[in-house]
Image (cartoon, helix red, strand yellow):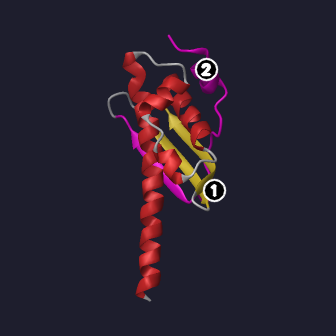
Amino acid sequence: MYSKTLIDHFRNPRNMGRMENPDAVGKGGNPVCGDVMYIYLKIKDNRIEDIKFETFGCAAAIGTTSMITEMAKGKTLEEAMKITKKDVENAVGGLPPIKRHCSNLSADVLRKAIEKYLAEQKAKSGKKKGK
């Protein structure tokens, strides 16, 4: 049912855990299946310097979130925003149709974290200009 790559990311997740003092946090969930994901980012010079995650859910949810952290780490924010749901699914070797929402959720949560960071940076720069 699952590829060797997905099973490896589930059994040996990369970048798992809470991050102290992240620059941004993305959160998302799927009320139908109960999966909940958090992605934490440390950003330096517009690049994802460090990334961590916490996922509460099935093997596919944990495996896809682990994979997306590997895909995004070291990329610029613009590059990371271009990681698609299909990119994640392909990177884990495919998903059964009933589990595709898991790859969709991980890509959405990464995007939310980046968008939150960019909005906060824009707000900070606006405050500096208003002084």
- Furthest-top residue in view? 1
Looking at the image, which residue is at 55% across and 26% down?
Answer: 91
Whether residue 36 appears in this view of the structure is no
Residue for badge 1: 20
Q: What is the span of residues highlighted in magenta in the rendered image?
A: 1-30
Q: Position of residue 81 (x, y in %)?
A: 46, 47
Question: What amino acid is at disc 1?
Answer: Glu
Nearest the eye: 131 or 18: 131
Location of residue 46 (image quadrant): bottom right
- Image quarter where the C terminus lies is bottom left
Residue for badge 2: 5
Gap in angstroms between the C-alphas marked 2 and 1: 29 Å
Question: What amino acid is at disc 2?
Answer: Thr
Does residue 22 sit above or below 51 in this rendering? Answer: below
> Is 17 in the magenta?
yes
Dot 1: element = loop
Q: Position of residue 5 (x, y in %)?
A: 61, 20
